[in-house]
Amino acid sequence: MINVLGIINYDDASVHVAGLENYRPIPSLSFLARYRLIDFALSNMTNSGIKRIQVYVKHKPRSIIEHLGSGRQYNINSKHGKLRILTGEDSIQSEAYNHDITAFLQNMRFIEDANQEYVMIMPSHMIYTVDFKGVYKQHLETKADVTVLYKTVNNAHESFMGVDTLKLDDKKQVLEIEKNRGKYKNRHISLAAYMMSRELFIHLIHLADNISSLYTLRDVLQEQAPLLKMIGFSVKGYVACINSLKEYFRVNMELTDYNIAKELFRDEWPIHTRTSDSCPAQYTPTARVNCSIVANGCFIEGTVVGSVIGRGVVIKKGALVENSIVLEGSVIGEDVHLKNVVVDKSAVVSKVKELVSDDSKILYVKRQDRV
């Protein structure tokens, strides 16, 4: 166990997963038929020995509360750790004021009462694995004020749009923070994950509030970067940013490739989640499944190619589902053809026999819709 308080922060204003986020907060988006996005952030923390964690939820907290429960599935033992799910406690008249600094201020007593000397703050929409013990070690060795995690990528002109990028010197000290506008391929992408002392964190919260009621943690860090010793920590392996429906779809599809998925999923670093006890997926003699992820409880009579199929989905005889995501409890009727579609939870697609698009514009079927 390391002397760090874990904080799962709000997702910033650049995150907008159209359709899906109308029904649940970003942290509880279904991912690869088994997980929720927040599982990766929480697993990184608990696998690293961080056992006291605060989760801040901006909207619609019910699904997060149900999914996380007491935190036992993440190996958070109530005798040695604590998982708190926190929301803003005061009403917000304008959405512009509903940001992370406001939530931190409204829950300041939980931050001040924590015994940990350091905090590790990260959002849930960044998907990767990292051992925070290495971050903690570098933070102490470099005597940094703030250690910021980043990933060096060569596809910044296609992905990570609107995400912060870092300009670093040869000692990995942050010189500038700016937004990725897609102009360049190679960039140091900030993962919006920061380690700092709890004392500095509290100071930055109050400083942001004094500067502007609309300032976020990201804003105050950007402004204070020239005055702080901010050092980058390079994250290796697979990294993805789920900040749009297009990226949500692309990343799910990409990880159906085993050779890519094994960069993210490793035996020695389990991704914990809430399990669902149900029967295995059933395949009839007419079923054909290739290069896909199929969750338990499914009943497959049709053909599934390069897709992600959630728990309890029914795909009837003659149906063809290719390059699509079908979420829990949905039904795909006989002879229906789906391609490049996201079908939300408990929807039924049966009357319209063809929903086909190219991968530049993903089709979305609403939750519990009848098509």
Image (tube, rainbow, N blue to C red):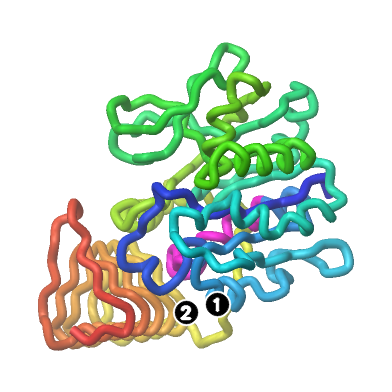
- Position of 153 with respect to 195 (left or right) is left
Cβ–Cβ below 8 Å for labels 2 and 1?
no
Q: In 3D space, how far apart are the residues under numbered discs 2 and 1 (Cα atoms)? A: 24 Å
Q: Quadrant of the C terminus?
A: bottom left
Please tell me which residue lies in front, 222 or 50. 222
**Could you tell which of marks 2 and 1 lies nearer the N-terminus?**
1
- Position of 196 with respect to 9 (left or right) is right
Q: Position of residue 181 (x, y in %)?
A: 31, 33
Q: Can the viewer see residue 324 in this picture?
A: yes
Q: Secondary structure at mark 2?
A: loop
Q: Write down the quadrant of residue 365 in the picture.
A: bottom left
Q: Position of residue 72 (x, y in %)?
A: 73, 71
Which mark is nearer the camera, 2 or 1? 1
Give the total number of marks visible in the rendering. Answer: 2
The residue pinned by badge 1 equals 62
The residue pinned by badge 2 equals 296
Q: Amino acid at mark 2?
A: Asn
Q: Which residue corresponds to the image point at 65% horizontal and 56% vertical from the top-left? A: 43
Q: Is residue 192 in the magenta section? A: no
Q: Which mark is drawn over residue 285?
A: none
Q: Amino acid at mark 1?
A: Arg
Q: Which residue corresponds to the image point at 42% horizontal and 39% vertical from the top-left? A: 163
Q: Which residue corresponds to the image point at 72% horizontal and 25% vertical from the top-left? A: 144
Please tell me which residue lies in front, 59 or 181. 59
- The crowd level at tag 1 (other Cα within 10 Å; few <14, some 14-19, many 20+) is few
Q: Secondary structure at mark 1?
A: helix
Tell which residue pokes out farthest to the top in this image. Answer: 170
Q: Which residues are magenta?
A: 29-44
Please tell me which residue lies in front, 179 or 329. 179
Q: Which residue corresponds to the image point at 19% horizontal and 80% vertical from the top-left? A: 319
